[in-house]
């Protein structure tokens, strides 16, 4: 079976409800010499998963899941290209893989639901972004968040330089100066275009900017739906902004030559732009919570939030990434809360909220202290 590399969260696999469902998380290394360590770490986690599956879920589904995960373990190419973390969701007939740009704690679980809190934290759009590094004759695209940045691979048959877009006339113009060809009287022949070489260069640059803008918008921004930060020389910032039709392009950019910056410097400069936006959105959610609580439309009581989630009343959910409340939430059980056994009720709440299209923030202690581990804003009061 071929596993699926997912680029967005959530993937439809989270709708699965027939156990066993396997969730595996582990930190990984990008360094080629540590490739073997990545697969060894996965092998050790797989042993734990195998023990639980055989002990608690013996049967055809378990055999199929283990077969698929062992196949992944043997895929040397897969382990050679990793980022900073890995999340794997596996059911009997499907394996979905998330390559993460932030380190995650080692964790594995076999349950009737998927463990998704690390994925929610990694893919919440409030701290994700892309950077368009625009040069004089080409571009690069990066994607990342406050923790990491990586270059997006542009297929060779799709990538175009300035020369590819405006044709060979551009190269000839700059090799020969202001004269591309000589007329019979010794005057410059400009292929029917009057003006200086500088004017032509501006026209060519505009053509290229329009092509880059359209390519990034259609092939990346519309798919990822995350903010796009332009990194280019100061004089090019306004020029690109004027022609851009990308709804995700941020007004503030990185006004430096991106070729003079390494990936860490690019990430740090991008996060300086993004952090106020992230904090503002989080503060707005907290303010909404306090206002809603005064109207009895919010709570931090797990049982009350569980009832609201069962009734599809969750509007916004704030969940602590670092806190676990042992047990499970079963929407089909009148009691709802099962505090026995393993599992994490906060994860179950997050999963239920995601399925009803609620806004979910998974935050660390440093950003938001949550005494119970969760706060919820309701869409309407309980009838």
Image (tube, helix red, strand yellow):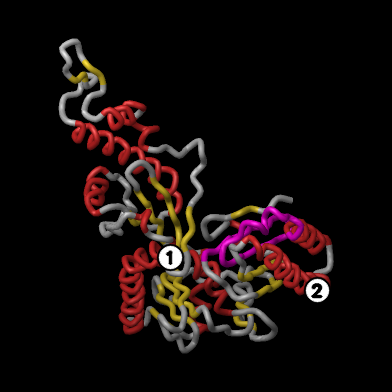
Between 122 and 314, which is closer to the camera in this rendering? Answer: 122
Residue 147 on image: x %, y %: 46, 69
Q: Residues within 10 Å of mark 2 (few under 14, many from 20)?
A: few
Residue 97 lies in what quarter of the image?
A: bottom right
> What residue appears at the point 57 percent right and 55 percent down from the top-left corner?
6
The residue indicated by pointer 1 is: 264
Q: Residue at x 76, y 57 (%)?
A: 74
- Asked whether the viewer can see residue 15, the reply is no
Q: Magenta segment: does it hold 31?
A: no
Left or right: where does residue 163 sit relative to residue 188? Answer: right
Q: Residues within 10 Å of mark 1 (few under 14, many from 20)?
A: few
Badge 1 marks a residue whose secondary structure is helix
Contact between marks 1 and 2 (CB within 8 A): the answer is no
Instruction: Pinpoint residue 48: horizontal percent, then vertical percent.
Output: 76, 74
**Mark 1 to mark 2: distance in Å?**
41 Å
* The magenta segment: 73-101
Nearest the camera: 364 or 20? 364
Which quarter of the image is occupied by the C terminus?
Answer: bottom left
Q: 107 above or below 197? A: below
Q: Which mark is on residue 94?
A: none
- Look at mark 2 in the image and give the residue it sits on: 51
Select label 1 or label 2 by which is in front. 1
Q: Image point 63% across, 76% down: which residue?
A: 333
């Amino acid at each position: 079976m071929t596993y699926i590399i997912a680029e967005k969260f959530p993937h439809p696999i989270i709708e699965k409800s027939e156990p066993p469902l396997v969730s595996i998380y582990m930190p990984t290394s990008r360094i080629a010499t540590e490739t073997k360590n990545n697969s060894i770490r996965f092998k050790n986690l797989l042993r734990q998963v195998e023990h639980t599956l055989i002990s608690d879920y013996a049967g055809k589904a378990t055999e199929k899941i283990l077969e698929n995960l062992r196949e992944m373990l043997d895929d040397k190419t897969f382990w050679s290209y990793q980022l900073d973390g890995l999340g794997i969701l596996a059911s009997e007939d499907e394996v979905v893989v998330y390559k993460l740009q932030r380190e995650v704690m080692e964790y594995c679980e076999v349950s009737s639901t998927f463990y998704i809190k690390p994925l929610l934290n990694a893919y919440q759009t409030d701290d994700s972004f892309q950077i368009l590094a625009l040069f004089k004759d080409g571009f690069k695209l990066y994607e990342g968040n406050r923790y990491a940045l990586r270059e997006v691979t542009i297929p060779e048959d799709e990538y175009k330089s300035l020369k590819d877009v405006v044709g060979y006339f551009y190269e000839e113009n700059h090799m020969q100066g202001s004269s591309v060809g000589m007329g019979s009287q010794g005057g410059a022949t400009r292929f029917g275009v009057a003006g200086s070489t500088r004017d032509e260069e501006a026209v060519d640059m505009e053509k290229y900017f329009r092509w880059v803008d359209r390519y990034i918008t259609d092939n990346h921004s519309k798919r990822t739906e995350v903010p796009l930060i332009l990194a280019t020389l100061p004089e090019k910032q306004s020029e690109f902004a004027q022609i851009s039709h990308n709804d995700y392009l941020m007004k503030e950019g990185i006004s430096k030559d991106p070729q003079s910056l390494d990936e860490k410097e690019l990430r740090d400069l991008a996060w300086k732009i993004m952090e106020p936006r992230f904090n503002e959105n989080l503060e707005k959610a907290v303010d909404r919570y306090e206002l809603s609580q005064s109207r009895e439309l919010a709570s931090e009581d797990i049982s009350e939030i569980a009832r609201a989630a069962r009734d599809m009343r969750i509007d916004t959910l704030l969940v602590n990434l670092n806190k676990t409340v042992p047990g499970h939430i079963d929407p089909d059980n009148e009691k709802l809360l099962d505090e026995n056994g393993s599992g994490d009720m906060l994860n179950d709440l997050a999963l239920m909220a995601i399925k009803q299209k609620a806004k979910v923030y998974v935050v660390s202690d440093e950003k938001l202290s949550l005494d119970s581990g969760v706060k919820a804003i309701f869409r309407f009061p309980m009838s």
